């Protein structure tokens, strides 16, 4: 199954030039825990609640620039990637959200580890390993 079929909502974005205070308010107001970071009109990464909490715990001001407190990593998947491929990307990179980006750089959506896991479990995918009984 292509991962694009798991998209349940439009990805909420934030400009990389935003302050961490603005990002925290946008998360609160939107009722979500992660935003896709946009720089130069293209998705450049994810900012999560964990990133914001860490920044504040490290003494950052709410006026600090987002790009100064997070690592922008263009970790993305294509919408036609399989659910299993995205699961492997998430596991290998220890991430919980992946932006789906079309070949031309357009943001198509965002999938979470919850979306991926539910799909794998629903179909009893071989990608979900049985616990070692020994």
Image (tube, grey):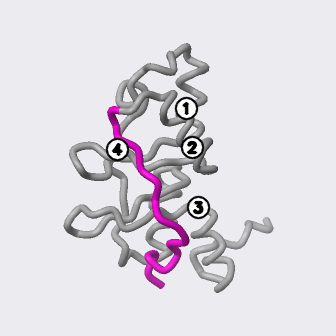
Estimate the spatial distance between the alpha carbons at disc 2 and disc 3, rounded to whole Å: 18 Å
Whole-Å distance between the Cαs marked 3 and 1?
19 Å
Membership of 25 in magenta stretch: no
User: Is 45 situated left or right of 58 in this image?
Assistant: left
Q: Which mark is residue 133?
A: none
Give the CA separation, mark 2 to mark 4: 20 Å
User: Which sits in the foreground, 133 or 45?
Assistant: 45
> Sequence-wise, which precedes: disc 2 or disc 1?
2
Q: Position of residue 75 (x, y in %)?
A: 36, 53
Find residue 26 and report its horizontal and vertical position in percent. 53, 41
Which badge, 2 or 3, is on the more N-terminal residue? 2
Q: Secondary structure at mark 4?
A: loop
Foreground tag (2 vs 3): 2
Above or below residue 19? Residue 91 is below
**Mark toward the start of the polypeptide (1 vs 4):** 1
- Image point (68%, 82%), residue name: 122
**Label 2's element?**
helix
Earlier-in-chain disc, 3 versus 1: 1
Which residue lies at the image location 46% right of the left edge and 75% below the top edge?
A: 3
Residue corresponding to mark 3: 113
| Residue pointed to by mark 1 | 52
Badge 4 vs badge 3, beta-carbon distance below 8 Å: no
Q: Give the residues drawn in magenta, as a range.
A: 1-17
Q: Circle 4: is it few (<14), some (14-19), or many (20+) Cα within 10 Å?
A: few
Question: Which callout, 4 or 3, points at the residue further toward the start of the chain?
Answer: 4
Q: How many marks?
A: 4
User: In the picture, which quadrant includes the C terminus?
Assistant: bottom right
Q: Which residue is mark 4?
A: 73
Foreground of the two, 93 or 55: 55
For disc 2, the marked residue is 27
Number of other residues with Cα within 10 Å of mark 1, as a class: few under 14, some 14 to 19, many 20 or more = many
């Amino acid at each position: 199954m292509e991962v694009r079929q798991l998209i349940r909502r439009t990805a909420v974005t934030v400009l990389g030039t935003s302050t961490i205070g603005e990002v925290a308010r946008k998360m609160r107001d939107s009722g979500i825990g992660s935003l896709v970071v946009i720089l130069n009109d293209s998705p450049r990464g994810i900012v999560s609640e964990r990133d914001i909490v860490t920044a504040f715990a490290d003494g950052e001001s709410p006026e600090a620039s987002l790009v100064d407190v997070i690592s922008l990593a263009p970790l993305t998947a294509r919408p036609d990637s399989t659910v299993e491929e995205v699961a492997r990307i998430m596991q290998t990179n220890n991430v919980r959200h992946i932006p789906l980006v079309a070949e031309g750089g357009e943001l198509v959506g965002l999938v979470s580890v919850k979306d991926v896991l539910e799909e794998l479990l629903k179909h009893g995918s071989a990608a979900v390993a049985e616990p070692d009984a020994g």
